[in-house]
Amino acid sequence: MSSVPPPTEPERKAEEESLGSLMSQVSHDLSTLIRQEIALAKAELSKTAKDAGKGAGMFGGAGVAGHFVLLFLSIALWAALGDTALGNAWSAVIVAVIWAIIAGVLAWLGKKNLDEVEGAPQTTETLKEVPDALKPAKESR
């Protein structure tokens, strides 16, 4: 004599509820899932854009500082060639070296900031799970 196992929860639910009701629940659950995924993606991309903006701003600062390096090195060369007074030429070189250090620090900070940009890792992970969530559950008998 073979014993029939009791119906599983999905089987019981399928017997008690209409197909339209079940489809309505699936549709509601799917739209909720999609809304949540969109909200997560917006939050992650907003943070990513903010971090990328910081890094880009620091690279911009490094570009301005690099421009000053060229400006002051040019002034230093001009002063050294045009005037033999040691004080004026060396003062321009010192200012140029300071700007070179500032440019280097800003470039390093900008690169560090851009290296930390992650994109949307949680959204990517959860979107990989959506196809599995839509597959019917396998029954174990």
Image (cartoon, helix red, strand yellow):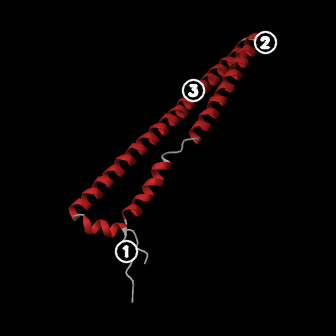
The percent position of residue 124, horizontal first and vertical second, equals: 46, 52
**Residue placed most toward the observer, 18 or 59:** 18
Query: Could you say whether the residue bearing mark 3 is in a helix, strand or loop?
Result: helix
Query: Could you say whether the residue bearing mark 2 is in a helix, strand or loop?
Result: helix
With respect to residue 123, does 43 lie above or below? above
**Farthest right residue?**
86
With respect to residue 63, does 120 lie above or below? below
Whole-Å distance between the Cαs marked 1 and 3?
A: 71 Å
Whichever of labels 1 and 3 marks the residue nearer the N terminus, that label is 1
Q: How many marks?
A: 3
Q: Quadrant of the N terminus?
A: bottom left
Q: Quadrant of the C terminus?
A: bottom left
How crowded pointer 1 is (Cα within 10 Å; few <14, some 14-19, many 20+) is rated as few
The percent position of residue 101, horizontal first and vertical second, equals: 69, 26
Whichever of labels 2 and 3 marks the residue nearer the N terminus, that label is 3
**Residue placed most toward the observer, 64 or 130:** 130
The percent position of residue 57, horizontal first and vertical second, equals: 53, 29
Q: Which residue is denoted by mark 1 in the rendering?
A: 6
Whole-Å distance between the Cαs marked 2 and 3?
A: 31 Å
Looking at the rendered structure, the kind of residue marked 3 is Gly
Whole-Å distance between the Cαs marked 2 and 1?
A: 99 Å
With respect to residue 45, does 4 lie above or below? below
Q: Which residue is denoted by mark 3 in the rendering?
A: 61
Looking at the rendered structure, the kind of residue marked 2 is Leu
**106 sits to left or right of 84:** left
Q: Which residue is denoted by mark 2 in the rendering?
A: 86
Q: Are marks 1 and 3 in contact (CB under 8 Å)?
A: no
Q: Residue at point 35% right, 73% down?
A: 7
